[in-house]
Image (tube, rainbow, N blue to C red):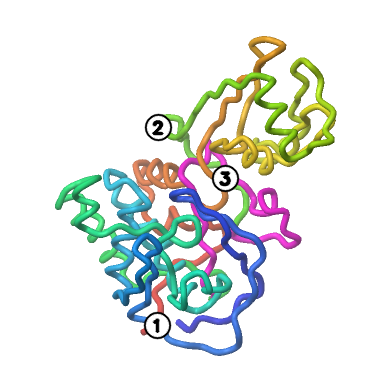
């Protein structure tokens, strides 16, 4: 197939491990080119740019981004998402590469994709068998990418959706909807380690954090906060703390929470218990959800089409 030009793209600006986040992205210039067999990779930890074969690079990305014990079909889905993003970077779809010092892509998960060498992976996470399993997932999906309207998509993913993914517009307040990044109600992910976390805050802690960003906020001596609205996926749309109303995304960033899918409880008039469900921005593919679907019998193509609405999973032209 030939890759055509996108009409709407998104620019990645933030990632926790396994989580890429976005704002507006310019369309690439007119023209077509065959997918690169090699790409240049900037490793900020070593201040080094290296040339890597695409498929070998993808193995290191999957090893860094998804647990090796996940179902093979989930690992394949991750490989296809990683390949799609890498080729999109080569094509210039995701904004400037200035921070890469001219390289196509970097290994900073806060900007592009995480990556790990085989030696480091075996030392820290697994063994030869685990690495071979990841290699199989990559080899079995060689040259496969995700497209929407014959264009490479921006394959956002996150760790755990808490049972439902989020619409991209709800997270980044972009003006146009991204048709393949809609809210999807998925499988139960409550059995995974990242699903739930409870954090207890004193009211003093909360007011201090709010005051750092809103110095003129009017805050009472006792707890005064409530969730004002939810998104379709059950995440916080707006929350009020004293006189300040903020978006769920802003609240998550201010308090360093795992997600915007939360519940509040009040052990006393001086404390707040915040329970988060899921991990990450919630947009695109849930990695835990991908594993859960795979264990229900979904193949990697089905998983990708489940999370990226209206997309095609196809082989790129050589």
Q: Main secondary structure of the magenta part?
A: loop
Q: Secondary structure at mark 1?
A: loop
Quick one: 78 or 240, which is closer to the camera?
Answer: 240
Compared across the picture, whether 144 is left or right of 308 comes to left
* Residue 69 picture quarter: top left
Q: Secondary structure at mark 3?
A: loop
Query: Measuring 75% from the left and 34% from the top, which residue is drawn there?
Result: 211
- Residue 177 sits inside the magenta stretch: yes
Above or below, 84 relative to 162: below
Q: CA distance from mark 3 to mark 1?
A: 31 Å
Mark 3 sits on what residue? 165
Instruction: Tell me where residue 301 appears, x and y as whole percent.
Output: 41, 59
Query: Measuring 76% from the left and 60% from the top, which residue is drawn there?
Result: 175
Above or below, 138 relative to 213: below
Q: Secondary structure at mark 2?
A: loop
Query: Measuring 37% from the left and 77% from the top, which residue is drawn there?
Result: 39
Quick one: 62 or 98, which is closer to the camera?
Answer: 98
Mark 1 or mark 2, earlier in chain: 2
* Residue 217 picture quarter: top right
Q: Specify the segment rendered in magenta.
A: 151-180
- Residue 281 sits inside the magenta stretch: no
- Residue sitting farthest toward the top: 268
State the mark number for residue 108: none
Q: CA distance from mark 3 to mark 2?
A: 18 Å
Report crowding for label 3: few under 14, some 14 to 19, many 20 or more residues within 10 A (C-alpha).
many
Mark 1 sits on what residue? 317
Instruction: Tell me where residue 95 appears, x and y as whole percent.
Output: 58, 72
Mark 2 sits on what residue? 193
């Amino acid at each position: 197939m030939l890759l055509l030009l996108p009409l709407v793209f998104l620019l990645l600006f933030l990632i926790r491990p396994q989580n890429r986040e976005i704002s507006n992205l310019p369309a690439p210039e007119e023209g077509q080119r065959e997918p690169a067999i090699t790409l240049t990779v900037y490793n900020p930890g070593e201040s080094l740019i290296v040339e890597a074969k695409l498929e070998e690079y993808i193995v290191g990305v999957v090893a860094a981004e998804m647990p090796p014990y996940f179902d093979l079909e989930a690992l394949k889905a991750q490989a296809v998402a990683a390949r799609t993003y890498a080729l999109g970077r080569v094509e210039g779809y995701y904004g400037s590469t200035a921070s890469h010092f001219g390289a196509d892509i970097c290994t900073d998960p806060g900007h592009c994709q995480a990556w790990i060498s085989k030696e480091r992976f075996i030392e820290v996470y697994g063994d030869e068998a685990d690495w071979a399993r990841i290699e199989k997932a990559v080899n079995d999906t060689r040259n496969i990418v995700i497209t929407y309207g014959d264009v490479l998509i921006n394959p956002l993913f996150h760790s755990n959706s808490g049972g439902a993914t989020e619409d991209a517009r709800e997270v980044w307040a972009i003006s146009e909807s991204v048709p393949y990044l809609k809210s999807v109600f998925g499988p139960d992910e409550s059995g995974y380690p990242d699903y739930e976390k409870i954090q207890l805050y004193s009211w003093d802690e909360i007011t201090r954090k709010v005051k750092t960003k809103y110095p003129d906020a009017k805050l009472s001596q006792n707890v005064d906060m409530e969730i004002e609205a939810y998104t379709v996926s059950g995440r916080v749309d707006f929350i009020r703390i004293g006189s300040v109303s903020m978006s769920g995304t802003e609240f998550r960033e201010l308090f360093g929470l795992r997600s915007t899918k939360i519940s509040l409880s009040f052990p006393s008039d001086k404390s707040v218990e915040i329970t988060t469900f899921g991990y990450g921005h919630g947009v695109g593919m849930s990695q835990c959800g991908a594993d859960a679907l795979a264990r229900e019998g979904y193949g990697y193509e089905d998983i990708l089409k489940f999370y990226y609405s209206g997309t095609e999973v196809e082989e790129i032209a050589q």
